[in-house]
Image (spheres, rainbow, N blue to C red):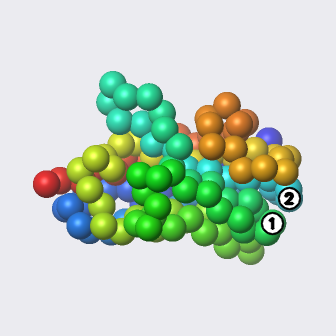
Amino acid sequence: QVHLVESGGGLVQAGGSLRLSCAASGRTFSNGAVGWFRQAPGKEREFVATISWYIGYTSYADSVKGRFTISRDNAKNTVYLQMNGLKPEDTAVYYCAAVRDTLRLPRVASGYDYWGQGTQVTVSS
């Protein structure tokens, strides 16, 4: 079992930055991937970014490309989401998710098996 805990959310003004962390415990990811999703009230959960654990290949949603950066520290079993140039439209609960064994980078929620509890990001105008 993989346990994921997000942290780093908060309130920030438009144009500001936040760094989210996703700490993983349990079995190692090995050939897996870790992704970030977000969900605003009344909206569907949407893909943000994902990274392959071992190699570090990344994929981003068009809406965040160029502003957000996903990375991982294998020694710390932690994945980060650096969010720069935040916009009010980025306001949502952000979730990290993991899949134990995959050769691709899923961009849909159904591609992941383990989920964190979420951390709130609020961007004010």
Choose between 10 and 37: the one closer to the eye.
Answer: 37
Quarter in which the C terminus is drawn:
bottom left
Q: Are marks 1 and 2 in contact (CB under 8 Å)?
A: yes
Choose between 99 and 25: the one closer to the eye.
Answer: 99
Position of 118 with respect to 25 (left or right) is left
Residue 7 location in percent, x, y? 47, 57
| Label 1 sits on residue | 54
Q: How many marks?
A: 2
Q: Earlier in the sequence, mark 1 or mark 2?
A: 2
| Label 2 sits on residue | 30
Quarter in which the N terminus is drawn:
top right
Asked which quadrant contains residue 43, the reply is top left
Can residue 79 be seen?
yes
Element type at mark 1: loop
**Image point (56%, 65%), residue name:** 70
Crowding at dot 2, Cα within 10 Å, few <14 / some 14-19 / many 20+, comes out as some
Choose between 57 and 62: the one closer to the eye.
Answer: 62
Task: Give, as a three-letter code, the residue at label 1.
Answer: Tyr
Specify the farthest residue to the left.
Answer: 125
Specify the farthest residue to the top.
Answer: 42
**Image point (51%, 67%), residue name:** 69
Q: CA distance from mark 1 to mark 2?
A: 6 Å
Residue 78 location in percent, x, y? 64, 64
Position of 100 with respect to 72 (left or right) is right
Position of 120 with respect to 23 (left or right) is left
Residue 20 location in percent, x, y? 47, 61
**Image point (45%, 42%), residue name:** 38
Residue 88 location in percent, x, y? 23, 50
